[in-house]
Amino acid sequence: MFRLGAALLRPVARGALARRVPSFAIVPRMAVRNAASPAMAMVGGAVKVAAAPAAGTASKAVGYWLMGCGGMVASMIVIGGATRITRSGLAMVDWRPQGGLPPISDAEWEEEFAKYQDFPEYKRGTGAKNIEEFKPIYYLEWGHRMWGRLIGVVFAVPGLYFAARGRIPRHIQPRLVGLFGLGGLQGLVGWWMVKSGLDEALLEEHAHEFSTKETRVSPYRLAAHLGTAFVTYAGLVWTGLEMLEARAAPAVAGAAATLSREAVAHLGAVRRAGLVASSLVGVTVLSGAFVAGNDAGLAYNSWPEMGYDMQGENVYVPEGMMAMEPAWRNLFENTATVQFDHRNLAYATTAAVLTLAAVARRDPALWATLPQSARTALYAALGMTGVQVSLGIGTLLSYVPEGLAIAHQGGSVALFTICLTLMQSLSSARRAQAGAALKHAGSVKAALKAAAV
Ligand code: HEM
């Protein structure tokens, strides 16, 4: 109970509703023993919760800047998908952190192509065979890398400006530093991934993983690269929305103050169902990286069945799913298993989104108490899940054409964004409710009672 109180108070003390909380509400010490907010101070056996600076300094410009950076990362994920699907990722065989211009003169192109010829993709005859084929894949990989550097600049320069003007609330400053670090890490992980496709010894060692003759990067490193991209994206969008929500906080808080016990319980249930659905979207995205990384979309191109058995009968569970030793490797390297997992995770995601809608819409009166942005996001989640699953099936049935595969990758970003919006909206309503309850009750105990948490 008291832990719940601490969990409730932490965002309240730090967050958008802080200015609606009385400046110094006395709260039992235990209730906040885990809450390390700069807005709290120990006084005797009690903790004083001061209004955090967040809401006061919350800036719309900061919110838009973070959302803009998020938009750039989203486009980067799509460009990354295009780079992979067009087999452009191994065109640049070295890496300079600061980047540079692409080759311009014929001599520079010759030089760059000569370097490429020393690496497995060319030697095995699976990549560009001449300069004319080499140029487009080089440009795409170069653009992918330079776009990443530009994101770093667009994040750092306005970030420093906002920091110098004191417009970044204290509690999000460490988060932004972490996000900048994640951006740098993304570049390093990208190069680590590319190196796995440039190393003949590594390719030989992992040859058994590959069902096609293409020269490819390690599926593990591809998944790490995609995973860190989604984490960075989530951090930017979540924080950006938090800043923008902070501007609307007083209105939300006003509405939240009038919530009944049933409405508060309903909000909690919808939030939990949303968390399950959003987590499943995240796991399905990661499993998609293994489908892509193993070229598993080029096998079992039937739906809903997955190929045939020895008697020529359609099957839902293909043979050889546990053929690899040790068993765990099947999850990440076995074509049949990774595709089977991806399909079933997608079905589980669909079921979770439908359940979320059922929980949220169970009672029309309670549905109406959810924030408008959450209701819109919920409808969007339903629609986008349908679109994403259809894109996945289409990609599979048509043997992974570039356009559909890129649209499927983009669809995963869209669905993930909708989940973030939904969760931020529900979290903001919960913070508002907690703040309103605390304002009216004056203490955590009374607030918990009033909020029926
Ligand atoms: C919630 C639903 C889904 C999500 C979030 C999702 C997400 C993803 C992601 C992120 C990738 C990696 C793309 C890349 O790295 O280029 C991927 C690949 C793939 N997915 Fe899905 N997916 C979903 C549903 C499905 C379904 C239902 C199918 C088919 C039955 C499917 C088939 C594929 C295939 C074939 C690939 C490999 C494409 C390639 O090689 O470029 N997906 N998915």
Image (cartoon, rainbow, N blue to C red):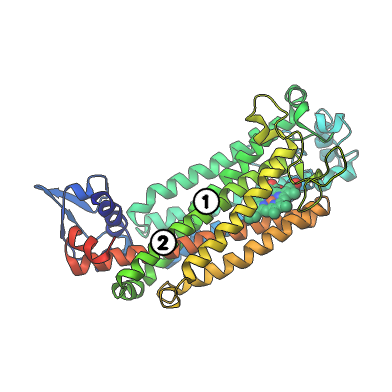
Q: Residue at x 67, y 59 (%)?
A: 388
Q: Amino acid at mark 2?
A: Ala
Residue 193 vertical position relative to residue 144 in the rendered view, above or below: above
Q: Residue at x 34, y 67 (%)?
A: 264
Percent coordinates x, y for residue 2 in the rendering: 23, 50
The residue nearer to you, when weighing 381 against 359, is 359
* Residue 381 quadrant: bottom right
The residue nearer to you, when weighing 170 against 230, is 230
Q: Which element carries disc 2, helix, strand or loop? A: helix
Residues under numbered marks 1 and 2 in contact, where contact means CB atoms less than 8 Å apart? no
Q: Would you say residue 242 is visible in this rendering?
A: no
Q: Residue at x 53, y 67 (%)?
A: 378
Which mark lies nearer to you, 1 or 2? 2
Percent coordinates x, y for residue 21 in the rendering: 23, 65
Percent coordinates x, y for residue 27 in the rendering: 16, 55
Is the CB atom of the residue marked by disc 1 within 8 angstroms of ligand 1's nearest atom? no
Q: The C terminus appears in which quarter of the rendering?
A: bottom left
Judged from this view, the residue extending furthest toward the left is 44
- Describe residue 167's horizontal placement relative to residue 18 as left or right: right
Q: Which element carries disc 1, helix, strand or loop? A: helix
The residue nearer to you, when weighing 105 against 163, is 163
Residue 221 vertical position relative to residue 152 in the rendered view, above or below: above
Q: Label 1 vs label 2: CA separation? A: 15 Å
- The tag on residue 279 is 1
Residue 423 vertical position relative to residue 199 in the rendered view, above or below: below
Q: Amino acid at mark 1?
A: Ser
Disc 2 target residue: 269
